[in-house]
Image (spheres, rainbow, N blue to C red):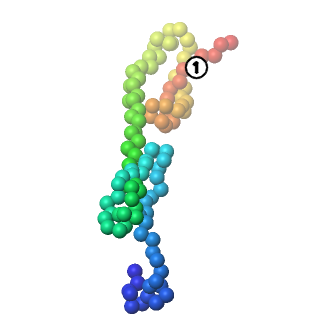
Amino acid sequence: VRNRAQVSPEDRNVRRSKRNKTKPLQFWKNEKLVYGAHEEEGELGELMGDMPVVISVQKALKTPKKTRPAKAARPTIKFNPTALRKKYAIEEGNKAELWDEDEEQIRRIQVVAYAAD
């Protein structure tokens, strides 16, 4: 803000707006201007008549955050190679790298595969 002593005589006669400035409304969130009767008295009140003025801005409610249901824990089934050995010929030590969806990482685990002739 400039000091009055520094303001040139031409700038003193400049008319400045007295309009209340507001942020742009978020119409997608249903924000609205609330209008009401003015509280001006005297000559200005007579000139304004019944003209409504902005009293406030009706703010939108915060968008509720959706809560996701917790993932159901899958039962862990232990691998039992003895039951499969009776039916199929299984070689020990066959491991592979597979993506574990629950832990979201690659794990090296024992794999049993069956190939038809």
Q: In the rendered image of this protein, does residue 56 appear above or below residue 92?
A: below
Q: Quadrant of residue 51?
A: bottom left
- Residue 62 place in picture, x, y as percent: 38, 44
Furthest residue in direction top, as rendered: 87
Q: Residue at x 47, y 17 (%)?
A: 81
Q: Residue at x 42, y 90 (%)?
A: 6
Using the image as rendered, state which of residue 39 and residue 111 is in the foreground. Answer: 39
- Residue 93 place in picture, x, y as percent: 52, 26
Q: Amino acid at mark 1?
A: Ala
- Residue 17 place in picture, x, y as percent: 45, 71
Using the image as rendered, state which of residue 115 and residue 61 is in the foreground. Answer: 61
Q: Quadrant of the N terminus?
A: bottom left
Q: Quadrant of residue 77?
A: top left
Q: In the rendered image of this protein, does residue 9 appear above or below residue 43?
A: below
Furthest residue in direction right, as rendered: 117
Q: Residue at x 56, y 14 (%)?
A: 89
Using the image as rendered, state which of residue 76 and residue 112 is in the foreground. Answer: 76
Q: How many marks?
A: 1
Q: In the rendered image of this protein, does residue 17 appear above or below residue 7?
A: above
Q: Residue at x 68, y 12 (%)?
A: 117
Question: Circle 1 is placed at which residue position?
Answer: 113
Describe the element under mark 1 as helix, strand or loop. loop
User: How dense is the environment of label 1, judged by Cα within 10 Å: few (below 14), some, or many (20 and up)?
Assistant: few
- Specify whether residue 42 is in view: yes
- Residue 2 place in picture, x, y as percent: 41, 84
- Specify whether residue 53 is in view: no
Using the image as rendered, state which of residue 82 and residue 51 is in the foreground. Answer: 51
Q: In the rendered image of this protein, does residue 84 appear above or below residue 92?
A: above
